[in-house]
Image (spheres, grey):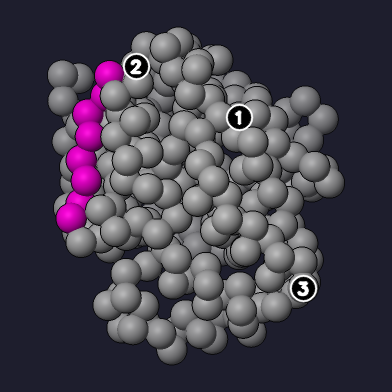
Amino acid sequence: MSVTIGTAAANGFTMNYFSFGTGERPLVIIPGISIKSVMESAEFVARAYDMFSEHYTVYVLDRRTELPEKYTVDEMGADTAAVMDSLGLRDAYIIGVSQGGCIAQIIAARRPGLVKKMALESTISRLCPESEKVVNEWVELAKKHDKDGLNLVFAKGIYTDSYFERYKDAITVMSRLYTYEELDRFVILAESMSGYTVYDELGKVNCPVLVIGGSEDRIFSPSCFKETAEKLHGELHIFEGYGHACYDEAPEAKQLIFEFFERDR
């Protein structure tokens, strides 16, 4: 599959993205926090979302190229919306993953014309103290430039035990590839979650919404997924036995989203 790499400019900043697919409908994927940029996984992501490529042109948006020292999720939402404007993406189908789902909710609440349907994967509408403890541990390890420690805690938090054990060797070696610059960038992205909430604005969202999550999520409580779905009057699907990365581990996750987007089209 052909993948196009690009850089969009908006409001004095730039944002990297990649796109694939040949469909008439725009689909925007906003990924979660990662230590390595999603841009380095472009081919993998394109293969994973191949089922969308016939009916959609898919845009996967990174964060700002150069991050300010302090960067809030609200600002990420404004920046992502500005990039969608610069790329001419309106009435888009959006998949928001983890922190990317936080960004997607902000866009849907404040720029409703940009969003036709929205799928939220393992995400929340406000940060609870338990989740803040998890994120703070990531931040402390990244600030110490503890590559191995951060890699291990991050992976064990996201994946189920069985998945982690199956891919343990590949996951472990990843820490050798991290740079200090990437760890410093990760700190800014993770610290942005402090104080995050869009819960009281969700009444402004007027598009159909699907919320999915795992019953064993160690980062965000499944009760948060239920809370978000209820506030948005959206559909909710909890994958039993899966954790935060249910969107990658559960084989039917992407099919569920595809069917939701295609329904009543």
- Give the structural element (helix, strand or loop) at label 2: loop
Residue furthest to the bottom in view is 169
Q: Nearer the viewer, mark 3 or mark 2?
A: 3
- Give the structural element (helix, strand or loop) at label 1: helix
Give residue 219's quadrant in the image.
Answer: bottom left
Left or right? Give the position of 189 relative to 233. Answer: right
Say which residue appears at 47% left-offset and 80% top-offset: 171
Magenta-span inclusion, residue 238: yes
Query: Which image quadrant: the C terminus?
Result: top left
Residue 130 appears at what percent x and percent y?
50, 51
> Disc 3 vs disc 2: Cβ atoms closer than 8 Å?
no
Residue furthest to the front in view is 129
Of 114 and 236, the residue lying toward us: 236
Residue for badge 1: 77
Say which residue appears at 40% left-offset and 32% top-offset: 94
Left or right? Give the position of 83 relative to 252. Answer: right
Residue for badge 3: 144
Label 1 environment density (alpha carbons within 10 Å; few <14, some 14–19, many ≥20): many
**Given the image, on which type of amino acid does mark 3 rest?**
Lys
Label 2 environment density (alpha carbons within 10 Å; few <14, some 14–19, many ≥20): some
Residue for badge 2: 207
Give residue 106's quadrant in the image.
Answer: top right
> Disc 1 vs disc 2: Cβ atoms closer than 8 Å?
no
Of 237 and 252, the residue lying toward us: 237
Of 223 and 202, the residue lying toward us: 223
Give the residues in magenta.
233-240
Residue 163 appears at what percent x and percent y?
31, 75
